[in-house]
Image (cartoon, grey):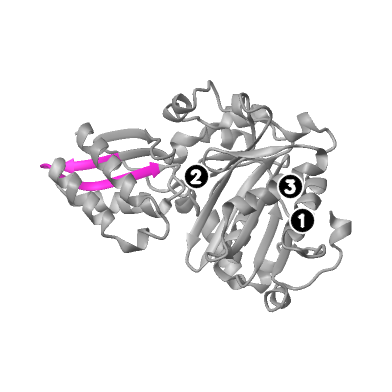
Amino acid sequence: LAARCSHRRSWRELSTSSTPLKVMVSNTTNPFFNLATEEWLFRNGDISGHTLFLWRNEPTVVIGRCQNPWKECNVQAMEEKGVHLARRSSGGGAVYQDLGNTNFTFLSSTDNFDKMRNSAIIMEALRKWGLTASTSGRNDIVVGPPDQPLKISGAAYKLAPPRALHHGTLLIDVDMTALSALLNPNKLKLQSKGVASVGARVTNLKKIKSDITHETLSDAVIDAFCAHYGSARIEPEILDPSLLQREEKLRKTRDEWMDVKWRFGETPQFSHHLESRFESPSPWGTIDVHIDSKKGVILQAEVFSDSLYPLLIQALAASLHGVSYDKSGMDEAMAKILNDSSLAAEVPDLPLYVPALAAWLKASL
C-alpha cells in the first residue's frame, strides 16, 4: 500500500480541492492518534464530497460512547497485557482491535450519507477474492451460508448535522484468543442472538482466503470506493503523528481521547439497577440503568448501552434526574425525551422506542 501511496498532498490542499473524493491512510498504529484523527476529520473535514479513511491499531479495546468499561471488558487483564482502552464518540458495542484488524471510516454530509452504500463498497472490495458478503443485524457484514453466517465486520455511525460518519472493522487475522479473553459478552445480547460466545459468531478473513492482508484489502477498498463514484483511483494522503505539531485541534482531541476520565468515566455506586435488551421494531440495544434515589426522588441516573443512538442514551439519563421514582415519574421522563426535537434527526424510530422504554421502566419499579 505504501508504494502505491507515494503521491502526498497536504490536508489543507485536499480540503480545498475540487475533487468530490478524498482518500487518507494512517501510517501509525497508535489508537489515540487514529481515533483522534478520525474525530478531527469528522469535526473539521470537507463534507462537500466523500472521504475514506483507513487505519489500524495496536492491541486495543474500543468501547462505545455510552458503555461501562468495567462491564464490557476485563480491565485487569488488559492492563497486565498492555492492551489500550479507548472510547470512541459513536455508539455501538465494544470491539477488540489489533494489527490483524483493518478499520474503515466514511465521512460525508448527512444529505449524502447512506450506510448501505458504504457497506456495499466494503462488500464489493471483498469480491476481489471471490467472497460474497451480505449485511446482517444492525451494521454487521457476514460471509458464509445464510444458516451459519460468520461476522467479519461490525460498524457504527454518528450523525451531527450537517456531518455524518460511518466506521467499522474488518477482521483479517485478529487474535481471537485475546478477543474472547478481554471482552465480556452481555448475557442478554447473547440470549437474543441464540449463540454461546462472542468467538462463535466471528471469523478471520485469512481463514477463508489466506492471501488477504491489511495492505491488499486496503487497496481493494480504495479501488471499490473510487469505482463506486465513477472515479479513477485516487492515491491516498498518508497521515502521521507529525500532524499533531501542525494541527492544534487534532492535538487537543488526541489529548481528550487519552484522558482517563473520558476513557473510564465516573461510575459511582447506585441503589437500583435495571437492565434489558430491546428488539422491536428491530434490535436497537441493551439498556443498563443505574439509579440513585432518596425519599422517592431520583437524585442521579447513569445509563450504559451499546445502542447506536448515544444522544438517546444521554437524554434518557438526563430525563430521569429529579423525577419521582414511580410510574408518574417515568411518564414525565419519557415526555421530556419525546419533546426533545434535537433527537428526531438521530433517532428516526423515537416514537416507537420511547413507549417500549416507558413500559419496561414502569414494570421494573
Where are the magenta residues, as a range?
Answer: 290-304
| Residue at numbered disc 3 | 124
Tell me the distance, in whole angstroms, between the alpha carbons under discs 3 and 1: 11 Å
Quadrant where the image shows the C terminus: top left
> Of helix, strand and loop, which one carries label 1?
helix
> Of helix, strand and loop, which one carries label 3?
helix
Quadrant where the image shows the N terminus: bottom right
- Residue extending farthest left: 295
N-terminal-most mark, 3 or 1: 3
Image coords of residue 191 (percent x, y): 45, 24
| Residue at numbered disc 2 | 92
Mark 3 neighbour class, 10 Å CA radius: few under 14, some 14 to 19, many 20 or more:
many
Q: Amino acid at mark 1?
A: Ile
Asked if labels 1 and 3 touch by Cβ distance under 8 angstroms, the answer is no
Q: Nearer the viewer, mark 3 or mark 1?
A: 3
Frontmost residue, 355 versus 94: 355
Point out which mark residue 222 bears: 1
